[in-house]
Amino acid sequence: MTLIAILASLLLERLLEHIQHLRRYERYHDYVVWMRERLRGSSWQGYLGVLALLAPPLLATVLVQTWLCGALFGLLSLLFAVAVLVFCLGPRDLGLELAEYRAALTADNAELATRLARGLLGGEPPEDLDAQARAVTGAVLTQANVRIFCVLFWFAILGPAGAVLYRAVAELCRDPMQTTAQTPVQAGDEFTWAARRIAEWLDWLPARLTAFGYALSGDFEAAVLRWRTSGAGGGEHWHASAADILIATGTGALDLDEDSRDNLTWDQVLQSTLSLVWRTLVLWVFVIALLTLAGWAG
């Protein structure tokens, strides 16, 4: 069921471009605010508060999945899994968002490019268009992990509850009370600190698998070398951030030097970056298919 649900979800993602507009998390953010207002005690300001907030949506997902299990030969359970996965991907379409940015960049529309870059970066982009495009290139490599690969990973491991868990934590890090995930944690804000720590744990393994996928889908030697020399390798590997690993490995796989683009335009670089993401996604689906077939054969 996992493989079928993933294939169906990715197909719907490609065919129904308007589906991203259905991914509205305002109700979830309202729920976060409502819960935090009631979890004001000091004992609820760390991990315990985050887990208490996550428990209801996770429990509801598990109960519905259990209730539907076996109904109509598993068809209802499959449809529910597809619906949950489609809802948890994104929330915005990375390909469409990047296409809009590339069009603005090609048209030298600095104002529009900056506004679109702000959405991709989750923060204020550099004013210089070269520096901005380089930052967006890195954002594509990292956002692919947050929007696609992590969701697929946790869905494959835990089913629909895994996808809900990852998206709930990722959105919690962008809770309106926190502005954006890049906003520095204020002193004494143990709730935000705990939420981001959980997000880091959930990112840890998928980010490294995605980075390995980038390496296999591009220049493997350059990707591994960049990984090792970026500070994300060696003794710091276990503690390196997901973003550091993904950007280092992704730019290495693209054979993109830090100071030059080998006479490529930024539009070409960004297109190559997105192509690397799609090749890695195909690789992931292929591996999941092999594991599924191996499970059936066993």
Image (cartoon, rainbow, N blue to C red):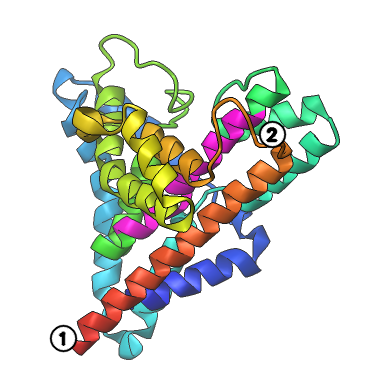
Q: Main secondary structure of the magenta part?
A: helix
The label nearer to you, 1 versus 2, is 1
Is any atom of residue 238 visible in this view? Answer: yes
Give the magenta range.
Answer: 133-154
Residue 125: x and y, percent?
Answer: 62, 22
**Label 1 Cα neighbours within 10 Å, binned few <14 / some 14-19 / many ≥20:** few
Q: Which residue sits at x=65%, y=31%?
A: 133
Q: In the picture, which quadrant includes the N terminus?
A: bottom left
User: Residue shown at 28%/16% (left/top)?
Assistant: 189
Amino acid type assigned to the residue bearing label 1 in the image: Gly
Q: Quadrant of residue 50?
A: top left
- Camera-nearest residue between 161 and 252: 252
Nearer the observer, 233 or 161: 233
Residue 44, horizontal then vertical, whole percent: 18, 26
Checking the image for residue 298, the label placed there is 1
**In the image, residue 146 lies in the stretch drawn in magenta:** yes
